[in-house]
Image (cartoon, grey):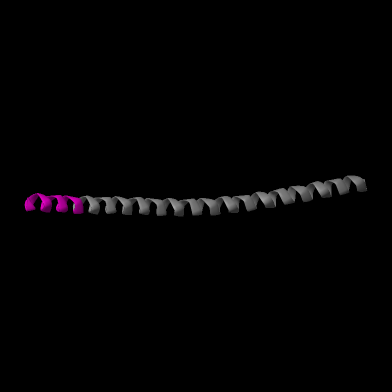
Amino acid sequence: MIQFLKANAVLLALVAVILYQQSELKEVERTLNYIYAAVQTNNNDIQATREEVWAVSDLILAVYEEEAAAAE
């Protein structure tokens, strides 16, 4: 009977450890999802800025070409 109780106590302890680790993994998953969302937002901001820079570059080139054509 004592062996049975010891075995069940060990089994319950293992279940408790597994449940604790599972909840820790959920916290890690939530944190990683938060970080991923922040990185995606940052990436979207970078892409928008890049497109704005390209638009300004295109505008500068157009003005330069227009001035070069007018100078000829």
Left or right? Give the position of 49 relative to 70. right
Give the left or right position of residue 19, taking residue 34 as reference: right
Which of the two residues, 32 or 14, is positioned nearer the viewer here? 32
Q: Residue at x 87, y 48 (%)?
A: 5
In depth, the one of 6 and 22 nearer the eye is: 22
Count all numbered tags in the image, as a single digit: 0
**What are the residue bounds of the magenta stretch?**
60-72
Furthest residue toward front: 72
Q: Residue at x 87, y 49 (%)?
A: 6
- In the picture, which quadrant includes the N terminus? top right
In the visual, does 39 lie left or right of 57? right
Main secondary structure of the magenta stretch: helix
Residue 60: which quarter of the image?
bottom left
Foreground pick, 36 / 69:
69
The residue lying toward the viewer, choosing from 13 and 25, is 25
In the rendered image, residue 34, in percent from the top left (x then y), is placed at: 50, 54
Point 51% across, 50% down: residue:
33
Image coordinates for residue 3, horizontal then vertical, percent: 91, 46
Any magenta on residue 63?
yes
Whole-percent x, y for residue 47 in the image: 35, 50
Rendering coords of residue 69 (x, y %): 9, 49
* Residue at the image position 89 percent from the left and 45 percent from the top: 4
Residue 70 among those drawn in magenta: yes
Question: Quick check: 15 left or right of 35?
Answer: right
